[in-house]
Amino acid sequence: MVQQKDLPILSQRTVRLILLAAFALTHLIIWKIQGVVYVDEAAKYIRIATSLYEQGKFGDQKFIVYLPVILLIYCCKLLQLPLFVAILIQTVFAGLALLKFYSIACEIGSKKTGFIAAIFLATCIPIHRWNLTLYSESIFISLLIFFLGFVYKYRHDLYSKKYWIIAFSVLLSFSRPHGLLFIPSILIYLFLNASDIKKRIRILLLSIIMIASLFALALFIFEGGGGMDAMKPFKESHVICYIPTKEKMPALDIVETGSVYNDLLYYITHNKVHFIKLTALKLKSFFLITRTHYSTVQNTYLTVLILILYPFTLFGIFRVVTTKNPFLLYLLVTLIIYPLACTLQCDDWHARFTVPILPHIILIASFGLHQLTIKSCKNNNEL
């Protein structure tokens, strides 16, 4: 058996302190770059929270799918605390999520590769910039990491925790609409995790109920007004929202029936070439995360980031398929379903749709690095 040297000198307490120090330094850099952000989308959440505080009602019901950040702002108003306290709370929550991520990464690899993965996460500006922005991303990403920890902890008998999984899935769905897109992969994992046919039938029935609820909530979001037009990115060939693609695209055959699902299905079945080409461009935008409206320095940083991360991720994906580790297969299924689901809308200006999946990608990359170190150790022993 190949033995790897873990971190023999440093205690786990010291390692965690190093991670939190790197986390704090990263936030200091972000604060120097952008400060603390309370405008744009944050202003909408502040308005809804103010309405809830002053009038006891939500104002715009659509914002219920951003509930945690709105309730956080509401509590600040209720306790007469400055909004910076909300920023501080979600940053502390992100720090706790980092420590949880470290423990998961150590379990699926080694303490050494877990530390490297956690340092990568701790210093990942695209993720942590949202901790200093009063948007919904910060709490949502932290919840996703804790959800990963829950799934990993009970990976051998996840079926027994199915109702907790449902509760967590509902929480994610009401933290940000993209939480809906993480439900299919966990349902698949639950189905495969069930030990007998009766349990699988129950999971299948549960899946039908949850998928139906997912569609109903998506219908509520996209068909209830409020400026959300699910067909607009397809009609105007948007890869990134509000920026039409420069690629030459075929003419479209579309209908407007008043149902977003009917319109979308008609578009896909009658405009296959356009749909496939636009999907490919959206996937490219999703994974590259660079933007033409970013500065050269910012795009260079992001390019270096993915050049470091993605090779290990690709090797990790290959090893996940060959080793058939159930939890890692769950990560892989999520990595397939979530980006494809995101292509049913335009990509975000600041790659906000990519950011929630980055912890999953880093975990797969850390597994890839762990497998490479095992292979290297074996080769050295054979010399």
Image: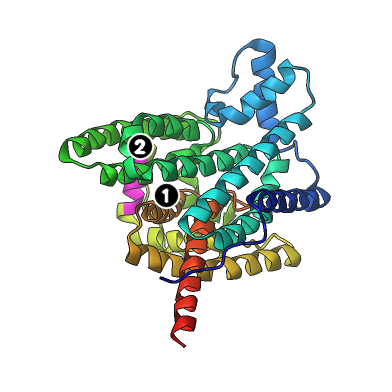
Residue 257, numbered circle = 2
Q: What amino acid does circle 2 point to?
A: Thr
Mark in front: 2 vs 1: 1
Q: Residue most toward the left? A: 197
Q: CA distance from mark 2 to mark 1?
A: 22 Å
Residue 163 lies left or right of residue 78; in this view the side is: left
The residue to which callout 1 is attached is 341
Which residues, given as a range, are shown in magenta? 261-268
Callout 1: SS: helix
Q: Earlier in the sequence, mark 2 or mark 1?
A: 2
Q: Based on the picture, tell me whether residue 266 belongs to the magenta stretch.
A: yes
Q: Position of residue 184 (x, y in %)?
A: 36, 43
Q: Is residue 243 visible to us here?
A: yes
Callout 2 environment at 10 Å: few (<14), some (14 to 19), or many (20+)? few
Q: Position of residue 305 (x, y in %)?
A: 63, 65
Q: Is residue 357 magenta?
A: no
SS class, disc 2: loop
- Horizontal placement of 23 versus 370: left or right? right
How many residues crowd mark 1 within 10 Å: few (<14), some (14–19), many (20+)?
some
In the picture as drawn, the residue positioned furthest to the top comes out as 55
- Quadrant where the N terminus sits is bottom left
Q: Quadrant of residue 250?
A: bottom left
What amino acid does circle 1 point to? Ala
Residue visible at 60% across and 69% down in the picture: 308
Using the rendered image of the protein, determine whether residue 248 is visible from the camera's viewpoint.
no
Residue 241 place in picture, x, y as percent: 57, 50
| Front residue (pair 344, 148) | 148
